[in-house]
Image (cartoon, helix red, strand yellow):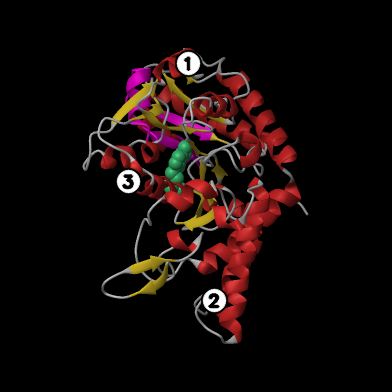
Amino acid sequence: MDIRSQFPILKREVYGKPLVYLDNTATSQTPRRVVDEIERMYFTTKANVHRGVFSISQEATDLQEQARERVRQFINARSTKEIIFTRGTTEAINLVAASYGDLMENGDEIILTVMEHHANIVPWQLLGRHKRIILRVVPIRPDGSLDMEAYRSLINERTRLVSVCHVSNVLGTVNPVKEIIAEAHSRSIPVMIDGAQAVSHMKVDVQDLDADFYAFSSHKMYGPTGVGVLYGRERLLNIMPPYQGGGEMIDHVTFERTTWAELPFKFEAGTPDFVGIAAYQKGIDFIEETTIDRIAAVEHDLLEYTSAKMVEIPGMHIYGSAPGKAAIISFNVEGVHHYDLGMLLDKQGVAVRTGHHCAQPLMHALGIEGCVRASFAVYNTRDEADRFLTALNRALPLLQ
Ligand code: PLP
């Protein structure tokens, strides 16, 4: 089936111009089958999960647990006990920071990188409210790749965790996470990977990577909003205290003492977004039917095609040129404010992101306040890339 026709939003117009949606890093669009499943669930199968003995509650529970198995297969985890549903990447990282962080002591160190999204910075800082945790930050090289020598030199006997993004949401850099993990593991240090920008663009196998934690969001992978995943190594999840308390996560409750449910439910307090989780399977179906290889090939072609034309524009500065980078082009043009450019592109139907992209420390390291970001997904086309370039060439003379 044709890819674009599965995404009704791609037919809409903005200011009378066909929408060219290039903010896929922030969220990807949703194929019809995902929304159909949400509707079907609400109209036929809305009953709380893991509670009722009645049929539709069991159907809803089965769908949620099928989705868990689907996610397990998708990232090749060993067991569904290692798949915890969250609200998104942000909540998954907060879970690890609060729960695994609970096991840390004053003076312990965590290694991050300068290219992290705020979601992989602030939760670790919050941990510092209760104890003295030191954050060590790996710098980048001029092309936006990670300075691996600096990384190695930051590891020491106080390092308790390394937490890095798989793919930078600004630079597009694909970090050598397998190497990062091997290095940390040689010193018995666990590694958390923020996979928000990776899972829908490349094959991720958590066993092959040997990751201890891996976080991602459904809405960035053609699925519904409000659903995310934390993969965690069973051995670590078992020693971690619960993150939130409430229904679903208990075994037995008295006012004196409560015991926890088995994994993964120990970390899933309250009613989950079981409708979203069921529909998330359809997003994964879309990725698997399209195939990651095809997605990667289309995105790579658009990245090469568009970047090659952009560098010809006088005053153009693109941030991030690491080999094998993802299809994310963050840029500024001399003398032009990123916000003004974003507005003029919008007037021509082109949706790009402007600002600091939730990566203020990276902006600081790059010496900028913000930039424009165009990012591609599998439904984008060369024709859309051309419309973006035309809009850019029309807007720039008005602003320079
Ligand atoms: N990490 C990275 C690298 C991201 O790009 C994003 C979102 O843009 C997040 C984390 C946060 O994801 P969410 O808002 O879905 O929790």
Q: Quadrant of the C terminus?
A: top left
Residue 167 picture location, percent across and down: 53, 32
Residue depicted at x 27% and y 42%: 126
Region of the chain picked out in magenta, as a range: 345-374
Give the secondary structure at mark 3: helix
Residue neighbourhood size for the residue with mark 1, other residues' Cα within 10 Å, grouped as few (<14), some (14–19), many (≥20): some
Is-magenta flag for residue 349?
A: yes
Pick the front one: 283 or 209: 209
Give the secondary structure at mark 2: helix
> Residue 151, relative to residue 88: is it above or below?
above
Residue that mark 3 sits on: 102
For marks 1 and 2, the one nearer the N-term is 2
For marks 2 and 3, the one nearer the N-term is 2
Residue 118 picture location, percent across and down: 36, 37
Residue that mark 1 sits on: 147
Pick the front one: 59 or 118: 59
Please identify, in this view, whether the residue under mark 3 or under mark 1 is nearer the observer: 3
Residue that mark 2 sits on: 42
Task: Using the image, tell me which numbered label, if any, was put on residue 110.
Answer: none
Gap between marks 3 and 1 measured at Cα:
29 Å
Residue 294 picture location, percent across and down: 74, 39
For marks 3 and 1, the one nearer the N-term is 3
Please identify, in this view, whether the residue under mark 1 or under mark 2 is nearer the observer: 1
| Contact, mark 1 vs mark 2 (Cβ under 8 Å) | no
Type of residue at label 1? Asp
Type of residue at label 3? Asp
